[in-house]
């Protein structure tokens, strides 16, 4: 790391938060000639994008929290000279089902092919749903290609952006009509409807007809103009290490274990104090953590938002489990593996969770990083057939864990594994890697853990409610270009997931905060 000059206390910019967004912002600013201090509260950089070895007995580095890269734009990679590779998945998703006693699964390849068409045919009895799928996602792909570049530009108004897209029907379906209504209209099969709906619910605790689901859906599917979910080679920590290398090369001063405890702002700039008693001044501050924390530091009302709604389980397997459907597990787990996510099941799970009950069966999504990128395991583990498995439970809001966090987490894990085991010939417990102390290689994280471990308010992976990536058409915004990073203080910018257009692992919020500062008149 760049050593701090003796008694250096003043910088052009202070960046608070050393996750991927904070690092991206710091790199852009330092590259532009600014003196930059990056303050990270923890003992290492990365935040939600860190890679860790959760099981000491095994040389396996898992992306503990954020685990896939969809939105990271090629422009940011090129601008900063990031030497980081993401890998495509040949399989988009596999959804096992039992219909009239027949075990099978809906297999969707990343690129439409005959096995995918046949899979839809076996499920629904015709080609109608497959044709509807191709038409629906074809329109989304066209919109993503046109919309993605705008995420790295000043915000446009809704009407202006809609006109520029030239796809009024697709825009209407994704922005103006509740996504649940659109899905029910476009698709007839309950399971197909559910697979489509899942992208609107990851991390978002709302019913399908809430426009917040539309926002979540949009961010999940416009990534880098392709919408592809890609696997980070070497895990998420590889991205963090590369951003740290670039930041250091450009002279960013990085201070670890430097949690901001106090913040003052005035006409001349900002003054920051850390919990360890260090103090620094700068003209500007980029806050790359949740806006709720910024509000507390400034003595302002904390903005209300949805709670986090996801259960995260990381596992190391001694081998992949066999499925009741008979499909090759290397195919089934190569993409997103959907469990109990029919549209009706997702609606029932939301209703139960809203009433304070943990859903049963629990809707799940899983993926196996090592089928695409084995580099996160040692050579020995790879040679012996080990694999990682990441599980994401839906509709498990933080409030379900408040009364008795330990018991609720144990129950959630039990129901998650039971939900998965419905479709496995080998119960997942039978293939979990054994540890020397007699335990199994499984790690469970509730929304409350996400708040305690990486400061996500109530476990919300987006920090706060998502906004559409444009300004509304109401008057009074003014003519000055806005990037979605600005606050009511001209010296303070939001550079984390809680900024407008910050949703997802993208670096977009960091880029836009840096641009807002650099282009300021």
Image (cartoon, rainbow, N blue to C red):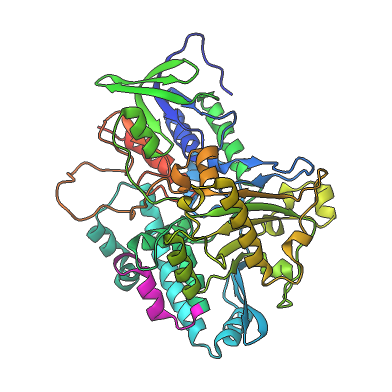
The image quarter in which residue 468 lies: bottom left
Q: Return the x and y of residue 280 as percentages of the image width and height.
A: 41, 17
Answer above or below: position of 362 versus 243: below
- Predominant secondary structure in magenta? helix
Answer above or below: position of 171 versus 70: below
Quadrant where the N terminus is found in the figure: top right
Q: Nearer the viewer, residue 233 or 203?
A: 203
Q: Is residue 400 magenta?
A: no
The image quarter in which residue 290 lies: top left
* Residue depicted at 50% across the width and 41% down the height: 451
User: Taking 180 as reference, is 89 left or right?
Assistant: right
* Residue depicted at 39% across the width and 32% down the height: 286
Q: Is residue 179 magenta?
A: yes
Q: Return the x and y of residue 259 as percentages of the image width and height.
A: 48, 26
Range drawn in magenta: 174-190
Answer above or below: position of 64 versus 350: above
Q: Report whether residue 181 is seen.
A: yes
């Amino acid at each position: 790391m760049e050593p701090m000059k003796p008694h250096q206390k003043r910088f052009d910019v202070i960046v608070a938060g050393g996750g991927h967004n904070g690092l991206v912002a710091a790199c852009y600013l330092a590259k532009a000639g600014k003196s930059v201090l990056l303050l990270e509260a923890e003992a290492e950089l990365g935040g939600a994008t860190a890679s860790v070895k959760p099981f000491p007995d095994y040389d396996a580095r898992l992306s503990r929290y954020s685990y896939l890269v969809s939105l990271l734009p090629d422009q940011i990679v090129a601008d900063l000279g990031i030497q980081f590779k993401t890998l495509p998945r040949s399989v988009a998703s596999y959804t096992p089902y039992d219909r009239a006693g027949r075990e099978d699964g809906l297999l969707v390849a990343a690129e439409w092919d005959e096995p995918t068409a046949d899979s839809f045919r076996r499920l629904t009895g015709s080609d109608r749903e497959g044709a509807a799928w191709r038409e629906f996602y074809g329109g989304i792909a066209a919109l993503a290609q046109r919309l993605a570049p705008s995420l790295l530009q000043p915000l446009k108004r809704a009407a202006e952006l809609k006109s520029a897209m030239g796809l009024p029907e697709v825009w209407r379906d994704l922005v103006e009509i509740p996504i649940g209504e659109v899905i029910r209209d476009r698709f007839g099969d309950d399971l197909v409807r559910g697979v489509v709906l899942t992208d609107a619910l990851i991390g978002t605790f709302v019913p399908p007809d809430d426009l917040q689901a539309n926002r979540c859906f949009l961010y999940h599917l416009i990534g880098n103009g392709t919408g592809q979910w890609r696997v980070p080679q070497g895990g998420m920590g590889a991205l963090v290490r590369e951003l740290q290398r670039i930041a250091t090369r450009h002279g960013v001063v990085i201070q670890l274990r430097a949690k901001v405890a106090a913040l003052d702002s005035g006409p001349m700039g900002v003054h920051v104090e850390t919990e360890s008693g260090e103090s620094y001044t700068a003209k500007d501050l980029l806050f790359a953590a949740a806006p709720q924390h910024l509000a507390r530091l400034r003595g302002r009302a904390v903005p209300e938002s949805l709670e986090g709604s996801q259960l995260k389980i990381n596992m190391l397997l001694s081998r992949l489990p066999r499925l009741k459907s008979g499909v090759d597990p290397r195919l089934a787990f190569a993409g997103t593996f959907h469990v109990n996510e029919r549209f009706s099941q997702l609606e029932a799970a939301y209703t139960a969770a809203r009433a304070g009950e943990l859903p049963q069966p629990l809707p799940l999504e899983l993926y196996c990083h090592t089928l695409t990128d084995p580099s996160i395991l040692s050579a020995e583990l790879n040679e012996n057939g080990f694999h990682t498995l990441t599980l994401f439970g839906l509709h498990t809001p933080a409030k379900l864990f408040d009364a008795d966090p330990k018991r609720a987490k144990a129950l959630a894990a039990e129901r998650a594994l039971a939900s998965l085991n419905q479709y496995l010939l080998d119960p997942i417990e039978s293939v979990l890697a054994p540890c020397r102390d007699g335990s199994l290689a499984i790690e469970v994280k509730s929304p409350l853990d996400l708040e305690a471990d990486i400061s996500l308010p109530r476990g919300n992976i987006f920090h706060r409610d998502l906004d559409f990536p444009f300004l509304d058409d109401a008057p009074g915004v003014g003519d000055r270009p806005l990037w979605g990073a600005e606050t009511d203080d001209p010296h303070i910018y939001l550079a984390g997931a809680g900024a407008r257009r910050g949703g997802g692992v993208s670096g977009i919020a960091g880029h836009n905060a840096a641009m807002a500062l650099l282009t300021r008149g």
